[in-house]
Amino acid sequence: MDRIASAFARARFEQRAAFVAYLCAGDPDFDTSLAACRAVIDAGVDVLELGVPFSDPLADGLTNQLAAQRALESGMTVPRVLELVRRIREFSEVPVVFYTYYNLIFAHGVEPAVRAAREAGADGMLVLDLPPEESAEFAAACRQHGLQTVCIVAPTTPDARLPKICAATTGFIYYVSREGVTGERQEMAADIPQAIARIKRHTALPVVVGFGISTRDHVRAVAQAADGVVVGSALVNVIKSNLDACATIAPHLRAKAADLIAGLR
């Protein structure tokens, strides 16, 4: 069983949803980012979703756009992202999923990019702007190298497309709970259980929910229906709020992640 499947199986055995934490790789610099990854892993996250910094992150709200900008300005590149994963693998077997855009894969060559990600220790890849209809080359490379695919379902996704999206997915389905971009929200969407039930008619894979989840109460509410809960901006904002004292980022992140994870219990 691969690391992603094992993480969700363990969560099911413990009768809870899995917690997926998003951080932008290299934010605000390589060493601090590595410490941040260790902090959320130590807090108990089940899956680490690493954003690969990109100059035009279309699906990201302001918080994650600024995180990507900080990472790029600090010199973060795709090879450095791979090095970050290799460093994480020195102390953790937590599944790592890249949150990325197709330009970054295409520019390096699809098969070499997938192979490099897998060799570095990544377990899966979510390519936000790659629809299943255009993903044959990417899917073949992932099958060849044992990298799991993660695909997105949105509130606006028609029922007719769900079988195609689910068929293109081997890791887990990422349900975007709100239209628009990433970012913290005060209120959660009301139709999450119905949306998850609609997706599960087409797949036995886990369905996780993200976009807008930012408090322990949000986590608790979503975890009642979903197989996993994704929190990103609320964690990235901890980094943003402590940029003047980078040494404090890791302990603050560990505390924030632990508070959110407590919503699963």
Image (spheres, helix red, strand yellow):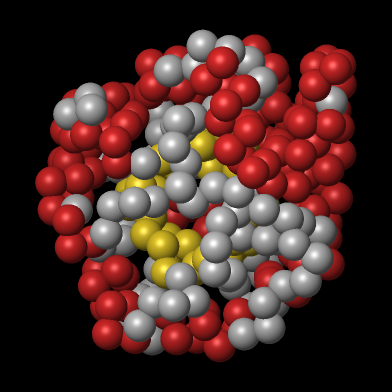
Q: Residue at x 83, y 43 (%)?
A: 256
Residue 148 to residue 23: above or below: below
Q: Residue at x 56, y 30 (%)?
A: 68
Q: Residue at x 35, y 47 (%)?
A: 127
Q: Position of 236 compared to 215: left or right?
A: left
Rendered location of residue 6, percent (x, y): 48, 52
Q: Position of 91 compared to 152: left or right?
A: right
Judge whether residue 86 can be spotted in this image.
Answer: no
Rendered location of residue 64, percent (x, y): 61, 40
Task: Give the quadrant of the C terminus.
Answer: bottom right
Q: Position of 210 compared to 117: left or right?
A: right
In this view, the residue in front, 40 or 11, is 40
Rendered location of residue 212, percent (x, y): 68, 61
**Number of numbered tags placed on the structure image:** 0
Judge whether residue 189 can be spotted in this image.
Answer: yes
Residue 204 to residue 25: above or below: below
Rendered location of residue 113, percent (x, y): 25, 29
In this view, the residue in front, 196 or 232, is 232
Q: Residue at x 50, y 67 (%)?
A: 175
Q: Quadrant of residue 200?
A: bottom left
